Image (cartoon, helix red, strand yellow):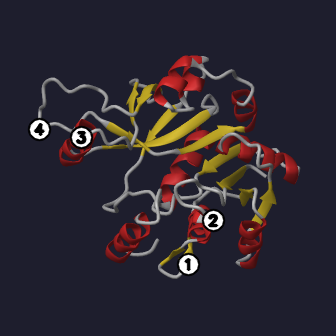
Amino acid sequence: MRTAVVIPSRFGSSRFPGKPLALIRGRTLIERVHSIAAAAAGVDLVLVATDDDRIAEHVRSFGGKAVMTSEACRNGSERVFEALGEAGLTPEIVINLQGDAVLTPPWVVAAVVEALQSESSVDVATPCVRLTWEEYDAHRARRQRGVVGGTTVVRSRSGDALYFSKEVLPVVRVEDRDAPCPVFRHIGLYGYRYPALARYLELAPTELEACEGLEQLRLLEHGMPIRCVEVFYRGRSHASIDNPEDVAKVEAILAHDGEF
C-alpha cells in the first residue's frame, strides 16, 4: 500500500457533540468526508480513526473502514498514527484529513498526494490557497474585530513554509491591487511520509506552537520542512463546521456550488 487517508473523528466535541454524525443535506458529516477522501486520485485506502463505537458502526454501515483508537490521543496526528498501528499498516504516504473537512475538494487532497509522490525530498506537505484582495480585506477585517479563525502561511520561493500564523501575514504595507494578493490561507490537511509522521510525534512541543496554538509550528521549530502546495478551489467556497449553527451555512454552500 502506498497512500492511506486517515480521518480522525471524535464524538465528544465541546462545541458540537456528535458532530461526525450530524446530517448535512441528508448525509452525515463523516460519510461526506469519507467520500471526498475516496474520490481523491492516488489514494489506496481510507480509514476513519475514532474513539466512539457509534461513529465506527456508522462508518461500517456505509461500507467504510473504521479503527478504534484511545480517548487519550491528544490531537488528530496521534489518533492517525495509532489507527495505523492498530490496523497493522505502514503506508509510504499518510494523509491526515480532518473529520469536518466537508468542503475540501478531492483534487486538493490529490494535490498533496502528488507533491509527496513526485518529489522524494518532500517529507511533509500541506495545501494553501492564495487569497483574492476581496478575501484578504474580509479576513483582515475579521481579525481587527477580534475574531480568531483561519490561518495564513508565508512561503519561501521553493514553496516551503516559513511561518504559520492566526494573524494575517505577511503585513502588506504597499498594496498593489493590480498584482496578485501575497497572502495565502492555509488548509488544515497534512500529508506525511510515514517516518516523518513517526518522528513528528516524538518531538517535544515548542514555544511558537504554544503561542499560536498551531501544532504544525512544532515541525518548523525542530527544522522539519513543510512543503506548502498551492491549490485552487475552482470557484467553490470554503467553510468549516465548528458549531451546530454552521450546518445551515455549509448546506447553503453545497446547494449553491453543487455536490462534489
| Residue 164 in the image, given as x and y percentages of width and height | 44, 29
Give the distance between the C-alpha atoms of the residues marked 1 and 4, in whole angstroms: 41 Å
Identify the residue at horizontal 34%, vertical 38% (top origin). 184
Q: Amino acid at mark 2?
A: Ala
For residue 86, side relative to residue 116 (left or right):
right
- Name the mark on residue 145: 3
Give the distance between the C-alpha atoms of the residues marked 3 and 2, in whole angstroms: 39 Å
Which comes sooner in the sequence, label 3 or label 4?
Answer: 3
Q: Amino acid at mark 1?
A: Arg
- Name the mark on residue 177: 4
Question: Which mark's residue is nearer the viewer, 1 or 4?
Answer: 1
Which comes sooner in the sequence, label 1 or label 3?
Answer: 1
Identify the residue at horizontal 44%, vertical 75% (top origin). 259
Is any atom of residue 45 visible in this view?
Answer: no
Disc 2 target residue: 38
Element at badge 3? loop
For residue 123, side relative to residue 216 (left or right):
right
Give the distance between the C-alpha atoms of the residues marked 3 and 4, in whole angstroms: 23 Å
Give the distance between the C-alpha atoms of the residues marked 2 and 4, in whole angstroms: 39 Å
Question: Which mark's residue is nearer the viewer, 1 or 2?
Answer: 1
Disc 1 target residue: 27
Which comes sooner in the sequence, label 2 or label 4?
Answer: 2
Question: Which mark's residue is nearer the viewer, 3 or 4?
Answer: 3
Give the distance between the C-alpha atoms of the residues marked 1 and 2, in whole angstroms: 16 Å
Q: Amino acid at mark 4?
A: Arg
| Residue 232 in the image, given as x and y percentages of width and height | 37, 52
Q: Residues within 10 Å of mark 2 (few under 14, many from 20)?
A: many
